[in-house]
Amino acid sequence: MLKIKDLRVSYGKLKVLKGVNLEIKEGECLGVIGESGTGKTTLALSIMRLVDEDSSASLEGEIFFQEKNLMEMDEEMIRKIRWNSISIVFQNKEDALNPVHTILDQVKEPIMENGGESKKEATEKAIHLLSQVGLASRCIKAYPHQLSEGEKQRSLLAMALANDPEVLILDEPVSSLDTTSKADMITKIKRLSRGYSVLVVTHDISTVAKLTDRVAVLYGGRIVELASTPLLLSNPRHPYTRGLLRSYPNMTTTKDLQGMKGRMQPVEKGCPFYPRCTQVVDVCKRKNPELQKIGERFLACHRGGILPFLKVKNLTKYFDSFRAVDSVCLTLYEGETLGLVGESGAGKTTLAKSIMGLFHSEGEIYLEGEKVGERDKKFYKTVQMIFQNPRESLSHRLNVLEAVREPLDIYKIGSFRQRSQKVEQTLTEVELPSDEEFLDRYPHHLSGGEIQRVVIARALVLDPKLLIADEPTSFLDASIQAKIVRLLLNLQEKRGLGLLFITHDIALARKVSDRLVVMLKGKIVEEGPTPQILSSPSHPYTRNLLRVAPTLT
Amino acid sequence: MNLKRKITNYGIAFLIILSLNFLLPRLMPGTPLTAIYGEEVLVQMTPEFKASLIKRFALDEPLYKQFIFYIFSLFRGDLGYSYYQSGSVFQIILAHLPWTFLLVGFSLILSTIGGIILGIESGWRRGKITDKAILTGMMTLSGFPSFFMGIMLLLFFAVNLGLFPLQGARTPYADIYGIWLVLDVVKHFILPLAALVLVEVSGCYLLTRNTMIMTLRKSFILTAKAKGLPDKKVRYRHAGRNSLLPVVTRTGIKLGTAVTGALFIEIIFSYPGVGNLIYSSLLMRDYPVLQGTLLMVAIFVLAANFFVDLIYKKLDPRVQNAY
Ligand code: SF4
C-alpha cells in the first residue's frame, strides 16, 4: 500500500532520517517505535509531504503510494492525496485543533473540501464519526478548549477518518492521555482502524504491543530492527531494542528497570548506536550496518544483533558413574542475565565449574563464537566467577588491596601504579571506599556485604565480559542482597556485563534475569524469556517451583 | 461574565465619568461660572445674562440638586452654551460629528481591512520578496507623523497638481444637490482620508503580520495543511482568523479615540470635524464646548470597549471562560 524507499530528511545540517526503508501492507498495522529525537514524527510528516513546510527541510528518497511516487507529485496533487488517501491523527498537544472553530466544523471541513457532499450530508457524516469515536453529543458543537484531553484526541481521530482514507497515520495517538483514557482510546482505534492500512508512530511500547502487527525500531534516523510485534517484544535482538524494553515499565517484564549507557547522540559515521553499544567492534564506527533479513526479522547490526556470548553444547559431567550434568545446552547473550534456577543438587554449581574449567567435562563450549579448549589467560580475562561463600573465596592473609590486585599481578597487567589505580577505580565501581584505611583491612574486619563486594571487585578488575555468579547472595541478609543485586545490574547496564546468575530462589531470579533456565537432576527442563516462563511454565517442576516460591500473602 | 454584570459595570463607569464632568468645574477656585466660562467672558457679560446662566445651571441650589439638574439637562441633550459660538454646545458638536465619523470611520475600516489583508499575505510569505517589499514600505510609512503625511499630500495633490480642493468638507456656498453634492463631498474627503489611511495602515499591518507569523507556528496550521485544504483556506480560515484577535482589540481602542483621532489631519485640511472643533475651542478657551466634547469622547471610548468585548467573544470562544 505504502512503500518508503531510502527516505532521507534533514533540517539544515541536522540529518534526521538517514535512509529509511519501510513498507505498509494493505490492511496491516505497522508500528514505529522511537524515543524523542529519533525522527519518528519527521517520518510521519514526510509521508504526507508535510516536512516540506519547513523551509530548511530537504527530502530525498521515494515514497510510493499505490505505485505512485509521492515525492514527484506537485503541490496540487499532494493536496488531493492528503486526507482523501492518507490522513493523520496528530498527537493532541498544544493546539492540534484550531481553537476558534467548533469540533464539528473542523471535522466537517475536509469532507466539504473534498466536494461531492452537500453541507447537510457533510454535517451528518461528521456527527456520525464523532459519535463513533464516542464523543458525547454536548461536545460536538463545543470548542476545543471546552473538551478534555481524551475528547480532543478522539475528535482528532474522527477527523482523520472523515474522508475514508486508505492509509491512516497515528502520531503518538495516546501519549497525552492518562492510563484509563489511554486504554479506552486504544480500543477505539483498534475498532475503527480495521480495514485501514495503519502506521502508528510512538515511543510507547504498550501502544505498539496492543495495536500493531509488525513493528520497526527507529534509532538515530535509521531502522535498526523490524519484526512481527510479538517476536520483537519477547525476543529483541538489537542491543537498542533490548535496552528500550528493559527501561520500559510494564506489567510483563519482571526484571528490574535498567537503562542504557550514555545518551542519544548524533553519529556522523557508522552504526547510530555505537556510542552506547556494549558489544561495539571497530567496523561499527566506520560503517553503518544495513538492515538485513536474519531469520524472521530484519536487523541492522554488524554482529548480527546481540551476540551469543557463551554457548554450551551437550555438556556432560560424570562423577564416577553419576551424571551430575546431563547434556546441557544453553546460550547466554551479550549483556544479558541468564538465570539458572534449580534446587541444590540439580547440578548448577557443577555446570558452572565445568564451564570455568575447574572440572573436566565432555561437550563443547563456545565463547564469542570460538570454541574453547584449554582455559587460558584469555578465557579467564573474559569470564570470571564468584562463589557462594565469599569468605571462603578470599584468602584471609591478603588485605583488600592485595586481594583485588592479585589477578592483575598474576596476569602482569600494567605497572604497579596502574594496578593500584585500577584497584581503586574498581572498588569505587562496586561502591566501596578506596582510602588507605579500607585498603589495609583484612577479610575478618569486613561485613558480609563488604566481602561480597570485594569479591566482585576482584572478579571485575580484569574487565571480564561475563560473570558467573553462583548463589552470590545466599549468605547475605535480604537488605544487603538487594544492594548486591542492584550493583550487578548496574554493572550490566554500564559495561554490558553478561551474568550467569545461579540461584535456587526463583523469586530472586525473576527480578534479575532476562531469560531463565530451569535445571533438574542435571538436565535443563525449561528455557525461555523470564516473563514467559513465569506466566506459562510448561514443566511440572517449574510450576512447583513457582507454587512454593515466597509470597507475602 | 454574564451580560448583566457587564452592563452594570459599564453603567458605573459611565456614572463616574458624568460625575467628574459635573464636579470638576465646580471644584475649581472661584465661582463655577468663572470656571465654566473664564474671567474675560464673565466681565463682558451683562448682569441679566449672568443671572440667566446661573438659573440655567441651577448654580444657586445645593450641590445634589445641581447634580440632578445637570443629569436631567444632559438627557435633554443640553451640554451647555457656548458664548463664543453663541449656540448650544450639543448643537455645535452635532454639527461637527458627522464629518469626523465619515472621515475616521472610513479610514478605520480601510486601514484595518487593508492592514489585515496585507499582514496575512505578508506573514504567510515570510522572508519572500513580496513580504520584504511590503514590510519595507510599511516600516517607512509608520515613520511618518500624520500631520506630515497630510501636508505632503496636500502640497502634492492639491497645491501642485490641483487635483483636489485645498480645504473644507465641501465647496462653500455651492448650490448643488444630489449626486453632485456627494461627489463634491467625496472630492474633499479623499485627501484627508488617504493621509489617515496611510498613517494608520502600517500599525495594523505590522500587528497582523507579527501575530500571523506566530500563528503559523501553531500545530493546527499543520493539521489544516494535512487536511489537504487549499492554501487560501489555511491562510484565512485557520491562520488569519486566529491572528485577528489582537487586531480587533487595537481597532477597538482606535474606535474609542475616533472622535479625536483625526485631530491633526482635520486641522491641516480645515476639515470641519470634532478635531477641528477641539482645536478652535482650545484657541478661544471655549470651555463649555471642550467639556462637552470630552464627555462625548469618554462615552465613545466606553461604547467602543463594550463593542470590542462583544466581538471578541464571537471571534475567540475561549474568552468566555477566560474571565
Ligand atoms: S554491534 Fe555494532 S552495529 Fe551492532 S548495534 Fe552495536 S555498534 Fe551497532
Image (cartoon, rainbow, N blue to C red):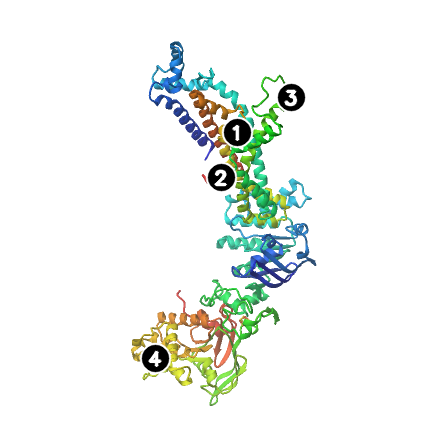
Q: Earlier in the sequence, mark 1 or mark 3?
A: 3
Q: What whole-number distance in Å separates the C-alpha atoms at marks 3 and 4?
A: 112 Å
Using the numbered discs, state the Cα–Cα distance from disc 3 to disc 2 in whole angstroms. 47 Å
Quarter of the view holding residue A257: bottom left
Decide if residue B244 is on the left or right side of residue B11. Answer: right
| Residue B26: image location, x then y, percent | 36, 21
- Residue with the mark numbered 4: A401
- Residue underneath mark 1: B265
Quick check: B114 above or below A88?
Answer: above
Q: Quadrant of the N terminus of chain A?
A: bottom right
Instruction: Identify the chain of the residue marked 2, using the numbered disc in the image.
Output: B
- Residue A57 is situated, as x and y percent measured from the top left of the image, at 59, 56
Mark pair 1, 3: CA separation: 25 Å
Q: Which residue is mark 3?
A: B180
Name the residue: 52% across, 29% down: B265
Is the residue at mark 3 from the same chain as the one at mark 2? yes
In the depicted view, which residue is nearer to us: A353 or B97?
Answer: B97
Q: Identify which amino acid the numbered label 1 is placed on.
A: Ile
Crowding at mark 4 (Cα within 10 Å: few <14, some 14-19, many 20+): many
Element carrying mark 4: helix
The kind of residue on which mark 4 rests is Leu
- Residue A532 visible within the image: yes
